[in-house]
Image: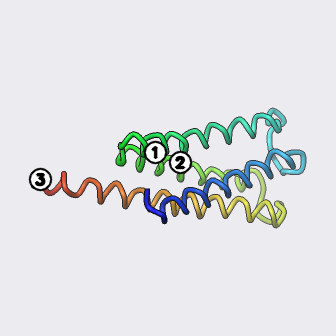
Amino acid sequence: MSLRMNLLFALYTLASLAHFTHNAEYIAYYPGLPASMTRESVYLAWLGVAAIGGLSLVAVRAGLARVAAVLLIAYGLLGVDGLLHYTLALCSEHTFVTNVTIWAEVVLGVTLACAAAIRVYRLSLPRLQAVA
């Protein structure tokens, strides 16, 4: 992966971890969350999301650049799920920090996904040109 992609990956991972950590540690204060959600379930959910990012690193090491980029698209787009908080409560009902962690995860996730999509396109160009 390029330096830019590594940086985006790291920033998104940190933003995602910050958001999930805030969710887990302040779960009692999040408006509208179902009672079935626990601190532990939030951390387990983050591990599931992070596993997709981890698989992209494994794919890079295995020389599967296109697979890695597709996994990065999925990983980044999972950050959009933070917007689901706003289906439970208005933006104004969340704390400032909650809103910052949500939007940081969303913006960085979409940015990572877009960068990875461009990478998939560039990796596919030689193959597309050979078909034409």
Residue 92 in the image, given as x and y percentages of width and height: 81, 66
Cβ–Cβ under 8 Å for marks 1 and 2: yes
Q: Amino acid at mark 2?
A: Tyr
Residue 83 in the image, given as x and y percentages of width and height: 66, 55
Task: Tell me which residue sits at (68%, 38%) in the image.
Answer: 45
Residue 29 in the image, given as x and y percentages of width and height: 89, 50
Q: Amino acid at mark 1?
A: Leu
Per the image, the residue denoted by label 1 is 71
Task: Tell me which residue sits at (73%, 54%) in the image.
Answer: 19
**Could you tell which of marks 3 and 1 lies nearer the N-terminus?**
1
Cβ–Cβ under 8 Å for marks 3 and 2: no
Per the image, the residue denoted by label 3 is 130
Crowding at dot 2, Cα within 10 Å, few <14 / some 14-19 / many 20+, comes out as many
Farthest residue to the right: give it: 28
Per the image, the residue denoted by label 2 is 75
Task: Tell me which residue sits at (79%, 60%) in the image.
Answer: 98
Give the alpha-carbon distance from disc 1 to disc 2, as whole Å: 6 Å
Q: Is residue 103 left or right of residue 111?
A: right
Give the alpha-carbon distance from disc 3 to disc 2, as whole Å: 30 Å
Q: Is residue 74 left or right of residue 91?
A: left
Residue 16 in the image, given as x and y percentages of width and height: 67, 53
Give the alpha-carbon distance from disc 3 to disc 1, as whole Å: 25 Å
